[in-house]
Amino acid sequence: MGPKDVLLNTIGTSDFILKSYMDGLSDSDIKLRPIEGMNSIALQLGHIIVAERMFAEMLRPGVSPALPDGFAEAHSLKEPRGDDSHLLTKDGYMSLLEAQRQATLKILGEIPESELESNQDGKLPPWAPTVAAVLNMVGLHSLNHSSQFVATRRMLKMKVAF
């Protein structure tokens, strides 16, 4: 197993977990806030999509599909909106996530292994200082947020996902 295989495994495992947590949730379920101060799954999904787009664009500007107008601002975790009028349906989020994921996987597929340790002439941030670290963040970041989906599932008394 080479380094690209490890990155693909991290992203794939994260996908499996996120999709398992999404299974059985409705459009209204993903808009719930299970406890005061916790963001809804919808807001977190939007944030995951925006962040993955940012990671991909760091590596290959222009590779990512466009997001709907105002999407990034509407899904900011720093200043979340108080109303839910900007939130999409479950299928809407999953479609955007899949489109972005395909762009990210294209980068991983096309990038030479020799470039994985590159810091792109110092352009990458300290928290992901190499191409490999940025690609690894794709899986780790979405895994971090999707683990928070459990609170909503428990509130709804749903079966444990796995």
Image (cartoon, helix red, strand yellow):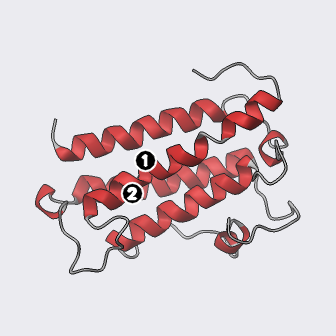
Q: Which circle marks residue 124 in the picture? A: none
Whichever of callouts 1 and 2 sits on the residue coming sooner in the sequence is 2
Across and down, in percent, residue 25 comes to: 75, 34
The image shows residue 154 at horizontal and vertical percentages of: 76, 28
Residue depicted at x 57% and y 56%: 48
Reply above or below: 8 against 124.
above
Query: Hey, which quadrant is residue 130 in on the image?
Result: bottom left
Left or right of residue 49, residue 42 in this image:
right
Give how far apart the Cα atoms at labels 1 and 2 are. Answer: 11 Å
Number of numbered discs overlaid on the protein picture? 2
Pick the quarter of the image with the N terminus. Answer: top left
Q: Position of residue 98 (x, y in %)?
A: 52, 49
- Asked if residue 63 shows in the view, the reply is no
| Whether residue 51 is situated above or below residue 143 in the rendered picture | below
Q: Position of residue 132 (x, y in %)?
A: 26, 57
SS assignment at label 1: helix
* Residue for badge 2: 104
Discs 1, 2 touching: Cβ within 8 Å: no
Q: Nearer the viewer, residue 143 or 46?
A: 143
Q: Is residue 112 left or right of residue 96?
A: left
Image mark for residue 139: 1
Front of the two marks 1 and 2: 1
Three-letter amino acid code at the position of disc 1: Gly
Q: Quadrant of residue 87?
A: bottom right
Q: Residue furthest left?
A: 114
Q: Residues within 10 Å of mark 2 (few under 14, many from 20)?
A: many
Seen in the picture, residue 109 relative to 34 is either above or below; the reply is below
